[in-house]
């Protein structure tokens, strides 16, 4: 078992690299072979990554959420999985490079530094916690992806506006599609965050004596969740769209990223386990 | 040397007023090809478009022939000119000719789109097909032209699939529609307003319809012209004075009128944008001078392109196409070599040469292997005897091949093919013409 985990741990960054390479070749060089291989390669990598996470859980008796490097692996998986879903639903296959490169980076870091810890705070062994953390990470991954699409949208928008037209911009999907993909990611992110908060609110008071509704991470996440909720409602009712909402998706991600980083680094609360 | 000649006129050698005099309709091509087949050629075909008219023919009298004399060439040029009664406008200097592999090379160049007025124009291939089909109907095509056209289509197809020389918009209307596809994802859910029923506007509207635009509105100062266009393309007319309210409703505006002053300004658009909840609006201003206030490009969700902007895109695309030329030339060279090889395999001399070479190779190998069984004095004798044997063996077949003048081309080709396959002579030496 341990051998299997080690093999997968080393193989995953290589697989992600190969996948990113395929998507890059397909996008920048129009390689026919790369175009055929890229999606299957992604699915294989995802399947192996999921196996890796499950085997780790079985081997160490806890879901891989106890250290920052374990969490990085889940973040990587979340980003890649979220992208795979978007690709399947929208049939737009040529933006993978920009998203999956994040997945590669996270997994590479994780594989380098991950520890094999079996002795952990018993609360971290709970399955509900696994769902809670996974949903939260999937949610944030989706938000990160929405920011990437928002960024691509803005690049293309400015390029078209400035009356120029370069090669790369020619290969990006059109503005409406980029906007749609960004919004789809936000909706996914919002749903997952809802699950994470829901499970958390249900389970946390039971698991912790010192539970407090004023825990910084809790407040941070609810704040981010509310921000995106308001954005989604505004889009529906007031009709925000285009450049405005794409900028918001990037700002939203930046706020989420910084607030979580700061909260994780500077504030403990009951939410801290490592 | 192939007995093929090409004579023609195109946009490089003659201005439009001259070359259009030689343009032939389908009926005219039929007549011309029939006449040429009767008088001069074993096989021939003509391709005629607004930018070129070209005649390709194989002289009667077998595969290998002497180079065509200058008077032969002049005779063909005169034929074309007289056929179209264009003696006043079209002179010999306006026309060009190529023979043998140069003619094949030229046809391949034409088919690949590199000889077109706009590089990469792939329409020409179907026009070549049309010309060939007409000639086929008139029974003026045979083995040679069939194989030549096969290779030609192959060149066209390979150029399209293996290079990007036909990609990227190089006309104003196409570039405008390509831009629209960069902004909007589904044109069938969008609507367009065409202001001005002139030619460029009409072309752009046609392309939009081709891409499945949902709704089309046409406005023109003279309403009847708009109505004519609507009858031809579909859509609805809009009063010229009622353009402003339409801005809230449509997603694409194409304007190509001559007007003093702007049709609408930034302020006019402000209200319309609010009404459309700032959904993206793509405005194409093809007017000279410009029809629309350029300030509107500063507004959010508005994309404005004038002729300059579109020309820049076209120039960029043309550069990209030109960069594909080496790639295309490689393909042409490959196909040319293959075609030449096929041609030579059907010719008597190269076949005899190859047969001799094959026999000589066997003789040499066997002599080398066994020469040490003989004493040094006998070695010369061995060479002599083996050479005599080979020559004797080859004498009859060679003579028979050379003297097959009464046979039909088909019988001759069959014979040569059988010899090649029986003796394994499939590799033809490159460069034999």
Image (cartoon, coloured by chain):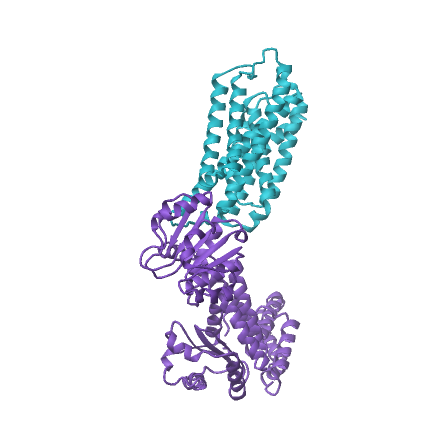
Chain colours: A cyan, B purple
In the displayed structure, B318 sits above or below A109; it is below
Residue at x-position 48% and y-position 38%: A240
In the displayed structure, B159 sits above or below B21; it is above
Residue B383 can be seen in this image: no
Where on the picture, by quarter, is residue A3? Answer: top right
Where on the picture, by quarter, is residue B365? Answer: bottom right
Q: Judge by depth and name the residue closer to the eye, B164 or A131.
A: A131
Q: Position of residue B382 (x, y in %)?
A: 60, 73
Residue at x-position 51% and y-position 50%: A30
Where on the picture, by quarter, is residue B151? Answer: bottom right
Q: Judge by depth and name the residue closer to the eye, A158 or B324.
A: A158
Q: Position of residue B276 (x, y in %)?
A: 46, 45
Q: Judge by depth and name the residue closer to the eye, A197 or B126.
A: A197
User: Left of A201 or right of it: where is A216?
Assistant: left
Number of callouts: 0
In the displayed structure, B113 sits above or below A155; it is below
Q: Judge by depth and name the residue closer to the eye, A18 or B407.
A: A18
Residue furthest toward the top?
Answer: A209
Q: Position of residue A113 (x, y in %)?
A: 54, 25
Q: Position of residue A226 (x, y in %)?
A: 53, 27
Residue A83 can be seen in this image: yes
């Amino acid at each position: 078992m341990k051998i299997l985990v080690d093999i997968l741990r080393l193989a995953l960054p290589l697989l992600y690299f190969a996948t990113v390479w395929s998507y890059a070749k397909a996008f920048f060089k129009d390689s026919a072979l790369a175009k055929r291989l890229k999606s299957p390669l992604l699915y294989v990598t995802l399947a192996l990554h999921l196996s890796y996470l499950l085997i780790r859980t079985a081997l160490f008796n806890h879901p891989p959420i106890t250290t920052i490097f374990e969490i990085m692996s889940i973040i990587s998986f979340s980003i890649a999985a979220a992208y795979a879903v978007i690709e399947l639903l929208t049939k737009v296959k040529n933006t993978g490079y920009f998203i999956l490169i994040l997945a590669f980076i996270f997994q590479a870091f994780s594989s380098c530094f991950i520890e094999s810890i079996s002795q952990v705070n018993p609360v971290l062994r709970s399955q509900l916690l696994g769902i809670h953390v996974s949903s939260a990470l999937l949610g944030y991954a989706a938000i990160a992806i929405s920011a990437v699409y928002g960024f691509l949208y803005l690049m293309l928008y400015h390029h078209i506006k400035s009356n120029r037209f370069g090669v790369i911009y020619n290969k990006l999907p059109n503005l409406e599609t980029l906007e749609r993909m960004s919004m789809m990611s936000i909706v996914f992110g919002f749903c997952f965050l809802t699950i994470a908060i829901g499970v958390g609110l249900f389970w946390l008071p039971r698991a912790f004596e010192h539970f407090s509704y004023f825990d910084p991470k809790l407040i941070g996440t609810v704040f981010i969740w509310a921000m995106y909720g308001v954005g989604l409602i505004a889009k529906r009712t007031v009709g925000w769209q285009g450049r405005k909402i794409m900028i918001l998706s990037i700002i939203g991600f930046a706020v989420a990223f910084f607030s979580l980083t700061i909260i994780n680094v500077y504030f403990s609360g009951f939410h801290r386990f490592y | 040397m192939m007995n093929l000649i090409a004579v023609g006129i195109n946009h490089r050698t003659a201005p439009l007023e001259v070359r259009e005099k030689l343009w032939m309709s389908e009926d005219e091509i039929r007549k011309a090809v029939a006449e040429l087949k009767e008088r001069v050629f074993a096989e021939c075909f003509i391709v005629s478009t607004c930018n070129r008219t070209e005649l390709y023919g194989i002289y009667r009298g077998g595969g290998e022939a002497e180079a065509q004399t200058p008077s032969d060439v002049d005779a063909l040029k005169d034929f074309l000119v007289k056929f179209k009664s264009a003696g006043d406008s079209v002179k010999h200097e306006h026309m060009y000719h190529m023979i043998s592999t140069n003619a094949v090379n030229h046809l391949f160049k034409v088919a690949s789109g590199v000889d077109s007025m706009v590089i990469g124009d792939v329409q020409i291939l179907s026009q070549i097909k049309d010309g060939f089909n007409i000639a086929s109907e008139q029974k003026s095509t045979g083995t040679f032209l069939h194989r030549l056209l096969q290779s030609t289509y192959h060149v066209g197809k390979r150029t399209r699939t293996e290079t990007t020389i036909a990609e990227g918009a190089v006309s104003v209307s196409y570039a405008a529609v390509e831009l629209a596809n960069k902004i909007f994802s589904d044109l069938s859910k969008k609507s367009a307003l065409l202001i001005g029923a002139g030619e460029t506007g009409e072309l752009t509207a046609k392309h939009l319809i081709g891409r499945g635009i949902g709704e089309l509105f046409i406005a023109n100062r003279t309403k009847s012209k708009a109505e004519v266009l609507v009858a031809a393309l579909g859509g609805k007319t809009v009063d010229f004075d009622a353009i402003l309210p339409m801005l809230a409703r449509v997603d694409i505006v194409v304007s190509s009128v001559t007007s003093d002053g702007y049709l609408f300004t930034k302020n006019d658009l402000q209200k319309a944008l609010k009404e459309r909840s700032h959904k993206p609006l793509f405005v194409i201003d093809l007017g000279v001078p410009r029809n629309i206030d350029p300030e509107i490009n500063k507004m959010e969700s508005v994309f404005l392109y004038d002729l300059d902007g579109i020309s820049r895109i076209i120039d960029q695309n043309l550069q990209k196409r030109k960069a594909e030329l080496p790639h295309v030339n490689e393909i042409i060279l490959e196909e040319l070599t293959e075609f030449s090889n096929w041609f030579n395999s059907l010719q008597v001399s190269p076949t005899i040469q190859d047969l001799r070479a094959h026999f000589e190779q066997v003789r040499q190998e066997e002599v080398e292997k066994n020469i040490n069984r003989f004493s040094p004095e006998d070695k010369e004798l061995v060479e002599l005897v083996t050479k005599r044997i080979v020559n004797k063996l080859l004498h009859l077949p060679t003579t028979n091949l050379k003297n097959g003048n009464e046979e039909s081309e088909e019988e001759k080709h069959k014979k040569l093919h059988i010899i090649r396959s029986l003796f394994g002579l499939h590799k033809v030496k490159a460069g034999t013409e």
